[in-house]
Image (spheres, rainbow, N blue to C red):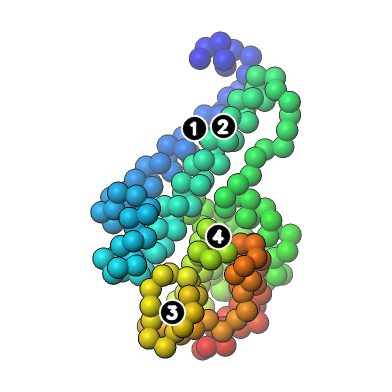
Amino acid sequence: MRAFFENVDPRTASAISDVSRRMYDLRERRKRLLEDTGCADADAMLAAVRDGALPEHPGYDAWLAVRLIGDRERALQETLQWRCLIANGGKRLPPPRSGLAALAYRIRSSLPSEFAGGMRLHPDGISFSGESGIQVLVRALTPQAWSFEWHWAGEGWRLDTAPVAHPGVDNVAHVHRPDGSVVAHPIALPLRGETSAVVLAFLEALVQSPTLGLG
């Protein structure tokens, strides 16, 4: 290890150390989520949400978080390998992007102006602060697996694809309103497209109506 760092400049060595620390923190966070639900892995968590052993929320959100944190761990592993390659004189390729980091990179230039200056990447989601005061947390794994949570005028809303049946709702994506009722989602979402397209369509709909027309 001494030989490895011998010719590495201090800033690069510090960056490598930081990536390693973040990988450890993510691993511990993922372990705590699993312990809190009593599930051995992410598959068991989702099965527990489906059969009612775990409440839909926060059970589905915890499942998304575990999966997204796992993706983030793998992304950091790729980053660590990239930094080590550069430190050892390898070809200076662009840094790798995957998971939430790749999603944030893809949507950044297309965000509605309401959210253009308020995007922040987290280990298990992406948050958006709107100029009008709306606060959004997006957990998006695939175009069909996601949970969008937002607060507006002191009330909490959620649009998600949790695999839980609700009376009168015949599609997967549904809205949890502040009064506890659950209704079918009222907006067009490209569920067979890219994850980024789903997120952007949702944010655009919020700009038009912070309650998606259901308030």
Q: CA distance from mark 3 to mark 2?
A: 40 Å
* Above or below, comparing residue 26 to residue 16 in the picture: below
Question: Residue flagged by tag 2: what amino acid is it?
Answer: Leu
Question: Which dot, 1 or 2, sits closer to the camera?
Answer: 2
Q: Is residue 82 left or right of residue 123?
A: right
Q: Which residue is mark 1?
A: 20
Q: Are marks 3 and 2 in contact (CB under 8 Å)?
A: no
Labels 1 and 2: the sequence-earlier one: 1
Which residue is located at x 60 percent, y 81 percent? Answer: 187
Question: Which circle marks residue 176 in the picture?
Answer: 3
Which residue is located at x 61 percent, y 74 percent? Answer: 189
Q: CA distance from mark 4 to mark 2?
A: 25 Å
Question: Which circle marks residue 1 in the picture?
Answer: none
Neighbour tally class for label 3: few under 14, some 14-19, many 20 plus, Cα within 10 Å: some
Q: CA distance from mark 4 to mark 1?
A: 27 Å
On the image, the x and y values in percent for residue 27 come to 40, 41
Question: Which dot, 4 or 2, sits closer to the camera?
Answer: 4
Labels 3 and 1: the sequence-earlier one: 1
Labels 4 and 1: the sequence-earlier one: 1
Q: Nearer the viewer, residue 33 or 141?
A: 141
On the image, the x and y values in percent for residue 176 come to 43, 79
Q: CA distance from mark 3 to mark 4?
A: 20 Å
Q: CA distance from mark 3 to mark 1?
A: 38 Å
Labels 3 and 2: the sequence-earlier one: 2
Q: Which residue is mark 2?
A: 80
Q: Are marks 1 and 2 in contact (CB under 8 Å)?
A: yes
Q: Are marks 4 and 1 in contact (CB under 8 Å)?
A: no
